[in-house]
Amino acid sequence: MNATSVDQVEFRWRPGKDFGPIACSTEDPRVHHASRLILPMATLPRGVTSGHRSLVYLVLPGDELATIIERSYDPDALVLTAPSSRAGGGRHPQVARALIGPCAAVSVDLALACLWQGLGALSLGEPPGQVPQGRTLARLPAADHEELTASFLARAAGRPQPVQGLTALVAAVLRQPGRPLAAMLPATDPQAPVPGAYLRGLRFTAAVLLQGTAHAWRPSFSTFEAAQGDDRGGLQPHLVFRVAQAHGGAPPTQPREENRIALWEEPRAPADECDTLARCLVRAYQELGGTGVAGRLEAVVSQYRTLEARLEAAAVCLRQYADPPASGYVFAVQKPASPATTGAHRAPGGADPVSAPPAAPGGPQETDGMDGKLLAELYRMLPAQDGDAFFQLVEWICAAAGRRVRVPEAEAAQIVEQLNHADWHAARLTGHYRDLAPSRLAGLLQPLLGPRLDRGQPMRWLAARLAREDGAEVWARAGALIYARLDDPRQAAVLADRLLPDLLHRMAEPRQETAPRLPASRPAQPPGLPPDWWRRPARVPRWLLAGLVLAVIVLSLLLVWW
């Protein structure tokens, strides 16, 4: 088995041997071992009737293999050497076809694509339910399943239809990622196929934030399972969709511990930060599409390793989709939900849709741009950050400065006063960035200067700061970089008029104080000798030391003889 090959296994009922594999595309022992592991999930749930179709996706332990199982109840399936179609209690219509291969090839995106189009969209050869026992199935070509995956991702770029209960499902996954989850379906029509909207919503929101974390989240699912009383043992998916009522029978002796979410319940006010962030994620998903919101979250994932840091950063990144009013953080780790964030929210597609902040008058509208209020939040987060998180915020602020984003003038004064106490973290920036420290300091300064440089507290403070001697070099270079980045010549002239006189005056003062003169208390040194010649150690040749020792010995002997 190579990195892109995908094998097939057909499961059917056989007289005297019960339900199990009857045909395979390979003799690879790993595939045969995997077929035994997935047999409990390949078996159809109890109570299904004609026309049933469900899909299971599992990541197998150990061999880095994954499987996609399509289960169906087909009365027209080929009868396998049975006296009649009713032999075995009518179980011959139960059919399951499994695709088994490396996780890179049999990915969750391919599973969702198969849920969307069915396994019939692939080059299976003989269709499920029409394979004689012992037949060698065809191996799927790599180009076939890669093309289907690409088609699914292209479709996921569009805006999805809203689906009830998705926010509660996302919040439950974020709240307890390692705990199995059951999404409860209405019992009115248990045979209706489960829409893939829930799984696609999870794939492009919560699953992106959870990838690579220490939590036990696994991207495995089953689109239909009966009530928990019908659970079978063995390997089970992390997320299952169940009917709301059992079909009867005794409860299980060891039921699986899982969180249950009723998808038909009406949305409620956010109970905690996970609910609040889930609303942001779902709204962003509905407005940006699956790949659009996943692209934003991938940028967060690449910078933060822990789930808590990712949730906080995602809340800041998607703050424009939060419930109004949205002052402060949308998500704070282990803090009670703010009452201000529990109000009613705007539904996407309604009279007042959630959208990106409008662009400045006269400029193009950029729905993906960062607004001034969000930038102000980044400034307020700086003092509380340690280590690499601090410098990541600095990079984001500098990037916003490069896009000419400005902090609102009403909030700039408070932020400047806060940063003044830390001297704008100039020493911290110098120790980390070294020669690039002036560029990062200029990036922190520029969004706070305001549209009018001839008035405003930040400009006055900057001029006063340049007049000081401590750290003057990095501040002077930062001012020069801001001057070079200004597009308006009039603002550049104002900046030069305010900063250059104080800078030139400071540079001229040291020359007057350090004129060359000798201290009156120290005597003049002889010409040709350095001023500290008497402190320097002298080097004596070894022959001279040996001669002195020999002379002392001879003089001592002469004195004894005399």
Image: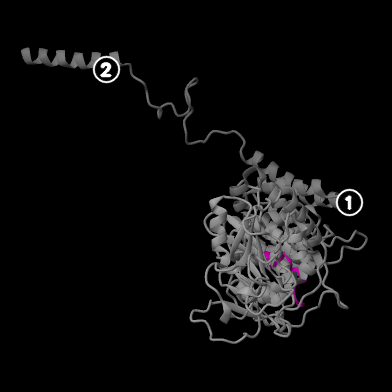
Quadrant showing the C terminus: top left
Residue that sits furthest to the right in the current view: 362
Question: Relative to residue 19, is residue 128 drawn left or right?
Answer: right
Residue 149 in the image, given as x and y percentages of width and height: 74, 56
Disc number at residue 145? none
| SS assignment at label 2 | helix
Q: Is residue 465 left or right of residue 527?
A: right
> Type of residue at label 1?
Arg
Query: Can you give x and y, in whole percent of width and height, for residue 203 in the image?
Result: 69, 64
- Give the magenta range: 312-325
Q: Residue at x 61, y 38 (%)?
A: 514
Magenta region, main secondary structure? helix
Q: Residue 381 colored magenta?
A: no
- Category of crowding for the residue at label 2, using alpha-carbon neighbours closer than 10 angstroms: few (below 14), some (14–19), many (at least 20): few
Residue 416 appears in which quarter of the rendering?
bottom right
From the image, tell me which residue sits under label 2.
Answer: 545
What is the spatial separation of the Cα atoms under label 1 and label 2, in whole angstroms?
Answer: 78 Å
Residue drawn at point x = 93 percent, y = 60 percent: 362
Question: Dividing the picture into quarters, in which one does residue 281 lie?
Answer: bottom right
Towards the viewer: 184 or 259: 184
Residue 114: quadrant of the picture: bottom right
* Label ID, residue 490: 1
Q: Is residue 313 magenta?
A: yes
